[in-house]
Image: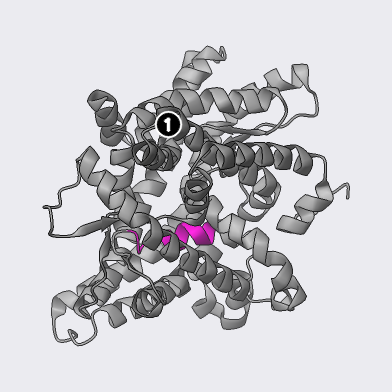
Amino acid sequence: MEYFRLIMSTFGAAIILPVFIFIAELFLKIKPGKAFKSAIYIGIGLNGLISILNPYFLGAMGNAVSEMITTQGIQLPYIDTGWGVLSALSYSTTIGAAIIPVGMIVNLILIRFNLTDTLNIDIWNYWQWAFIGTLIYYQTDNYLLGITVAVLMQLICIALADIAAPKMQEFFNLPGISFPHGSMISGTLIAMILRWPMEKLGILKININSDSIQKRFGVFGDSVVVGFLIAVLIGMIAWSGQYSNLETWSNILKIGVATGSFIFLYPKATSALLEGFDVLSDRVREIVAKRSPNRQIDFGMDGALAVGHPDTITTGLITMIVAVGMIFFLPNNEFLMLADLGVTPFFLAAGTVAIMNGNIIASVITNTVSLAITFYFSTWISPVFNNIARQIGGIDVESGEALVGADIRPVAGITYFLGQNWITTVIAILVVIVIMSTVRKSPKLREFLTGYKALDN
């Protein structure tokens, strides 16, 4: 168990995924040289995204806003531990050790019975399902229920990814990719719910997105420039009162450059990733075409592929500031988001902007709702997590010194509450399967939920 956790935490997604792809391509009888090149390109693309996204952009931004919060002396009982701790903790349990083989088997069964077109190869992020399953397992002392709840979250993520896939592919220009990533797809779920009211209120008709901003403001509307300026503004707010310190200005400008760098390099990294996937994609489609000529298989991937889009960055930056206000003023909030403050708003935004067709106003409103739900789920579930985390171990917090909390995004929170007993869990699984089958037969329902209009409609 410990060895498995060590492998997952040491190598990370940018290494584990290419190795997995290489083995899969050899199994599918792709020539070794071609498979090796494919895996390298996938590794380069994903590493490019993650190495800039996590420590350089999200890390720097999160530190700046965390500084703003801590200097205000805000005190809430449950402190955000961050997704890194949660993933390591998830893979250190028996649920975590089982989730990859179980998840892959369930996914293949869904594909075999034509319930999904998503082959989720983002095995690193299976930890999100394992995390919720682990909470249920330790809470109920029922291992089978825990692993079943983890599968329930997998089904919800894959169902939402399938529904949104055509719109995501069109908006982000990522053909053959879907996003069953628990964090990103949470934003998608809330966006699907709010899309119809936004349309009826006329908000979706307001043409404000990264393209319209650039056309109106010229160089100051360029996505890289906008990202730089907004990030610098956030830095100036975070370190207000410290302007006489030279290091302060260094930190402020570094955040601006980090943001601009990510926006600029994002399409180049995704281009390398997609080039690597071409080999696997062509081979899988060749195999599938022999059995089902009209079938398309999409590869489930990490939401990091969509975070660098200009509309995502703009929405994420704005709602990150809103999140700071929520920490202070949201009624009954007891969760102090710190470690994930530079992460959660952006991944939720990535799941939102495509459904809102890049509309910044609608996206910010929707993302704010998603964040509010996240704060409340985190407040309600953190006491459970705090107790369980101390049982499992691995979190370096002295007893009585602090209460640890978990950043629980909407899909994870919904799954947790549905998984409290066998009756609600089984009913939820059956409902998700019915939804999977229904949406596949109803393009009109997909259009209503996501705004995607198929060419043959």
Q: Nearer the viewer, residue 374 or 168?
A: 374
Residue 146 against residue 449 in the figure, above or below:
above
Q: Nearer the viewer, residue 52 or 365?
A: 365
- Quick check: 2 left or right of 233? left
Q: Which quadrant of the view contains residue 245?
A: bottom left
Residue 344 covered by magenta stretch: yes
* Dominant secondary structure, magenta: helix
Q: Is residue 257 visible from the viewing direction of this image?
A: yes
Kindly identify the residue that appears in the image at 66 percent across and 59 percent down. Answer: 192
Q: Quadrant of the N terminus?
A: top left
Q: Which quadrant of the view contains residue 352?
A: bottom right
Q: Which residues are magenta?
A: 340-350
Kindly identify the residue that appears in the image at 51 percent across and 47 percent down. Answer: 415
- Quick check: 43 left or right of 219? left
Neighbor class of circle 1 (other Cα within 10 Å; few <14, some 14-19, many 20+) is many
Residue 29 covered by magenta stretch: no
Q: Amino acid at mark 1?
A: Leu
How many callouts does the rendering have? Answer: 1
Q: Position of residue 116 (x, y in %)?
A: 68, 34
- Quick check: 447 left or right of 385? right
Q: Nearer the viewer, residue 455 or 221?
A: 455
Q: Which quadrant of the view contains residue 63?
A: bottom left
Q: Secondary structure at mark 1?
A: helix
Q: Position of residue 391 (x, y in %)?
A: 22, 41
Q: Is residue 303 visible from the viewing direction of this image?
A: no
Q: Position of residue 250 (x, y in %)?
A: 21, 73
- Quick check: 279 left or right of 437? left
Residue 201 against residue 287 in the figure, above or below:
below
Kindly identify the residue that appears in the image at 15 percent across and 74 percent down. Answer: 247
Q: Which residue is mark 1?
A: 17
